[in-house]
Amino acid sequence: MNNLLLFFVFSHVLKGGIIPPSDSLFIPNQALIKLIPSADAENFFEKHNLIPVRYSEYGKFWTITWKDKTAVDAMIKKLKYDPNVQYASKNAIFYITNSPFWIPNDPYLSYQWNLEKIRVFSAWDIEQGGDTTVIVGTLDTGCAYEDFPVPSYEKDEIDSTTTMYKKAPDFNEAFFVPGYDFVHNDAHSNDDHGHGTHVAGTIIESTNNGIGVAGIAFKVKLMPIKVINSLGWGSTDWVTDGVYYAATHGVDVLNMSIATSADPGPIFYQAIQYAASQGVIMVAGAGNNATSPPTYPAIYPEVIGVGATNSADSLAFYSNYGDSIELVAPGGDLVDRDNNGFPDLIVQQIIGMREIGFPKPKPDTFFYAGMAGTSMATPHISAVISLMLSHGIPKENVRTILRETSVDLGALGYDTIYGYGRIDAFCALGGEDTLPPSITNTTQWNDTNFTGPFPVWSEIQDLFGINNKYLFYKFNTEPYDSLTPCDSILQKYLFMIPSALPGTYIRYYIKAKDLSGNVQTAPEGAPGVTYGFIVLGTDITEKPTNFLEKRTIIIPHKMGFRLKTNKEVDFKIYNILGQVLKKGKLKPEEEFFWFPDSKGVYFFYLYKKSGQEYRIEKIFYTGLK
């Protein structure tokens, strides 16, 4: 890694996401099919003279081929007529999305103009490197994350003198989670190309360790999932299983620096939809054709599509644009705008690659390389998102924040060149957030006969997330005491003011602070202005000799209540004002259902015949009248 070797290569061997002619968009003589659950696969294959290549346990689909010369389109058309087939599509090819390379002789942070461009250093003052509770997955060529003997079935794909995959030196303090290699079908997703190691470095490169360069989210965990082979392409079945693997193994953010202009079909899209349903935030490069047709998976609404900009904040000459673009990030190009003697590319470590003169990849030898492409732009977005999650920003707010805080380039507002703009890490973490939390729908108690405890619900929201929330209350002239929520439903929080004696005057207010430090109270002006009420005492005094018990029921929202006893019981239902809402008899073992008209506090008074033993069951369940 300390070689005084200087290389600059513009790659023509691997097109780096530049889509080849149409006959190379798909794997020849292969298709993906998903059968109905009741189908007999063996009989189906025999009926159509098909040969199964592999089966996906994740997506429950088959990759198939055939011996005769039937064209792929004709075979798929034929299979779609079979009632046993749910889906049939061609096996599209995904490509990595990088372009030029540069190897400096002495890797310094000063070469990483991209970090300053998106204000990473300022962002680190808010969230320094992230947290290991966040997992970022990469669908790529793998990663140089471990020392591991080269399996015999992989030796032909790499340099013949290499016997060990090696961990890249500048990952010495990085955190990894085991992934999977869907190319070779094993549990060691080592990099036999170089692209995946470079992409991973932008996210989790060890930082402040005295060597090499920096990563943006260097304290999060990375899960390398290999779906691209040593030649830089991967088939749809590999990539589909990679998406499922990420979604079922705890990935929070999925980086996909890959693209295809061919529609990979419904089987792949089902995997994307499943990952989204599991809360995975997906980010994908839009490709390097300098054209506008949609690319996959960036075009999907569940995925953040990423274009590339240069150090002048202009669209990079190679970057795709159009409907696939939601955001842009630094991807680099060949111009030296900062006059340091080197092109303004994205610098990270790589293994020995074909693009820098190796006949075959050499995964035990490492260099620092400058590369460019939407592949390089994409991990900037993924890394910043992982910082946001580490900081406590809710997942459901991430895309809105990125859209609202990115630097608007080009036409005002959203456009199909820059999307919503170039990412700004500092702003995405709330660095310029001045809006306080929103506090609405707070329970306002009126004077009451009820003596408590007193439930107070309040809806508290903030785009960047809530740091803390309290209810402050005081009895008469006593000092204020504070409460934290005892329950919540979505963004509605329940505070419980303790019981009080009749004649007590209770004042209370809500106070919330967001992750940016902005504070809000409800009502505004608290504690000078507060909510308040007097405890008058209860007039529900009826307790005859056959009184069994009183049950206090707090119903937080529209919810049913079920009661059942083993003996006949008289009952009355009161509200907090002491008014009888319902009375009657509960028959033995007969379920009694009751739905209040609104949320609140209610009392069930139950009466029995003396000398009998009773069993009472009480169950809440959701549901409307």
Image (cartoon, grey):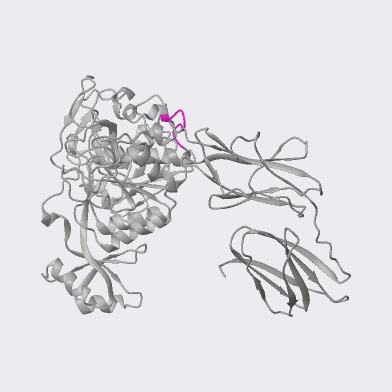
Along the line of sight, which residue is nearer the eye, 265 or 499?
499
Up-down: is 548 above or below 301? below
Q: Is residue 205 magenta?
A: no
Q: x%, y% of residue 428? A: 40, 36
Tell me the quarter of the picture where residue 540 sits.
bottom right
Q: Judge from the rendering whether residue 509 lies leftward or rightward of residue 623; answer left or right.
A: right
Task: Please give the name of the residue rendered at 34% of the width and 40% of the height, measured from the top-left corner.
Answer: 381
Q: x%, y% of residue 517? A: 52, 32
User: Which quadrant: the C terminus?
Assistant: bottom right
| Residue 383 appears anywhere in the view | no
Tell me the quarter of the picture where residue 475 sits.
top right
Task: Please give the name of the residue rendered at 36% of the width and 57% of the height, measured from the top-left corner.
Answer: 244
Task: Please give the name of the residue rendered at 20% of the width and 33% of the height, measured from the top-left corner.
Answer: 101
Tell me the quarter of the picture where residue 509 sits.
top right
Q: Judge from the rendering whether residue 228 lies leftward or rightward of residue 464; answer left or right.
A: left
User: Which quadrant: the N terminus?
Assistant: top left
Up-down: is 231 above or below 576? above
| Residue 302 appears anywhere in the view | yes
Considering the whole magenta stretch, tell me its main secondary structure: loop
Task: Please give the name of the residue rendered at 81% of the width and 59% of the height, measured from the top-left corner.
Answer: 539
Q: x%, y% of residue 146? A: 38, 41
Q: Is residue 126 magenta?
A: yes
Q: x%, y% of residue 363? A: 28, 39
Q: Judge from the rendering whether residue 499 lies leftward or rightward of residue 355; answer left or right.
A: right
Number of dots carrying numbers: 0
Q: Judge from the rendering whether residue 551 lies leftward or rightward of residue 180; answer left or right.
A: right
Up-down: is 157 above or below 60? above
Residue numbers of the magenta segment: 123-130
